[in-house]
Amino acid sequence: MNILSVASEVFPLIKTGGLADVAGALPIALAGHGVHMRTLMPGYPVVMQRLAAVEEVATFEDLLGEPARILAARHEGLDILVLDAPGFFDRPGGPYTDATGKDFVDNWQRFAALSLAGAEIARGLLPDWRPDIVQAHDWQAAMTAVYMRYTGLQHIPTVLTVHNLAFQGQYGADIFPDLGLPPEAFTVDGLEYYGDVGFLKGGLRTAWSITTVSPTYAHEIMTPEYGMGLEGLINARASDLVGIVNGIDTAVWNPETDTHIARPYAPGAPKQRAANRHALAERFSLEQDDGPIFCVISRLTWQKGIDLIAEIADWIVEQGGKLVVLGSGDQGLEGALLAAASRHRGRIGIVIGYNEPLSHLMQAGADAILIPSRFEPCGLTQLYGLRYGCIPIVARTGGLADTVIDANEAALSARVATGFQFTPINAEGLRQALRRVFKAYNEPKIWARIQNQGMKSDVSWENSAARYADLYSSLLSRANLS
């Protein structure tokens, strides 16, 4: 079975969030299920630099106004197709923003071009390979399903995977004539969304199947609270909606072989984490005492609940805890955390930015990871925490609720608890959860039991890859009957 995946970022080539981790890990996990996945992604400068050998396999004289090529490459087990369109992607900044952090004004055109290239590959653009199914990730690739629906490829099954419904790719109607689509695509059954062009909305309308990255998030987005204005459409497509929880790359995230940490250790041996705890405290200039170290590895945004952490940071220190933070985002939240670190030198440490090796050390050395997200489609840091014995403290929402077993009395008695959940999702809810955490931390046998149970959790892609393979098979059977 051949699958084309279309994604705006793929780890380890480029990453801004969990989408990249999924796009990079899923193809490798699917190989064991008889699925060959090739991934189409943009040719950002960093991607072009990291690919050692490329082969030109197709060209476009005019792809939405720019010449472009499709380049094929292999990279760390991934079969990559790169859309080399310098006019769209060869520029400083990140995948979506310029050096000042502002969105590129032509993002609609850049990612429509990526999607159109995906549709053309489905049509047979490559000389020796054609996909049976096309899977698109988030709004940046959602137009792939739209182009396929309106350019004669509606017989090929499409899957749209929603990693975060909050980001929708909504643009003014004036861009529609430049998308190269027939007029009938700009209707309520296609791209039209309250008079605008909605990339994600169009994908939700036209894809054969919609997946989200956890079962709970699939249910949540059918409600007004989490549906971001699209809940009506999602409810109308409920029979085509599937929630499949993410896994992690257990080769990359393996405490026994991790080269980014001070001392590797085996599951079931959390005491061996002590060297990493010491190294983490040194890295953040923390006092070397027995108080619990809480870590935060996150975008620093309201969605991630970082304001709640800033609100109770002083209280965490008063209780004898320490806090280390890695991330960037809202300047106000960055400032609040930096101010807390200034007030509590030796107890709170902050690194602003993204640092993959440091994130590994934090998971290996901290006692617990705080994830108070107001909504979380899946989340991966709690899965890394489980794997590394860094106990997750999570809001009861989305994939966090699906992947962490709360240490309530029943779960503790049954010895199945893997972390702590809390609700309501506010500062007081988080504070009450942390009271339970401090109590458990001060009972070493209970704490070790939660750690060990978490490290036994199956956080790999194996079960989830099998579910994707089953979904693909069902779509092919449906295509063969039609």
Image: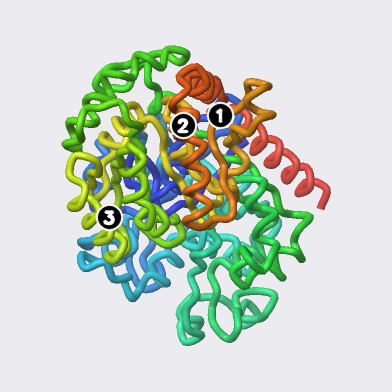
Q: Residues within 10 Å of mark 3 (few under 14, many from 20)?
A: many
Residue at 56% of width from left, 51% of height from top? 377
Q: Are marks 3 and 1 in contact (CB under 8 Å)?
A: no
Secondary structure category for the residue under label 2: strand
Q: Position of residue 159 (x, y in %)?
A: 63, 52
Q: Can the viewer see residue 46 in this picture?
A: yes
Which residue bears the numbered disc 2? 391
Which residue bears the numbered disc 3? 337
How far apart marks 3 and 1 lie (CA) works out to 28 Å
Which residue bears the numbered disc 1? 418
Observer-nearest of 136 and 332: 332
Observer-nearest of 93 and 309: 309
Q: How did the renderer colour the structure? A: rainbow
Q: Are marks 1 and 2 in contact (CB under 8 Å)?
A: yes
Q: Amino acid at mark 2?
A: Ile
Q: Quadrant of residue 86?
A: bottom left
**Left or right of 232, for residue 273:** left
Q: Position of residue 19 (x, y in %)?
A: 46, 48
Compared to 317, does 34 lie above or below?
above
Q: Position of residue 213 (x, y in %)?
A: 58, 47
Residue at 62% of width from left, 40% of height from top? 402
Q: How many marks?
A: 3
Compared to 356, does 337 lie above or below?
below
Decide which of tag 2 and tag 3 comes sooner along the chain: 3
Decide which of tag 3 and tag 1 comes sooner along the chain: 3
The single residue placed furthest to the right in the displayed view is: 481
Q: Position of residue 454 (x, y in %)?
A: 53, 25
How far apart marks 2 and 3 lie (CA) works out to 22 Å
Observer-nearest of 59 and 287: 287
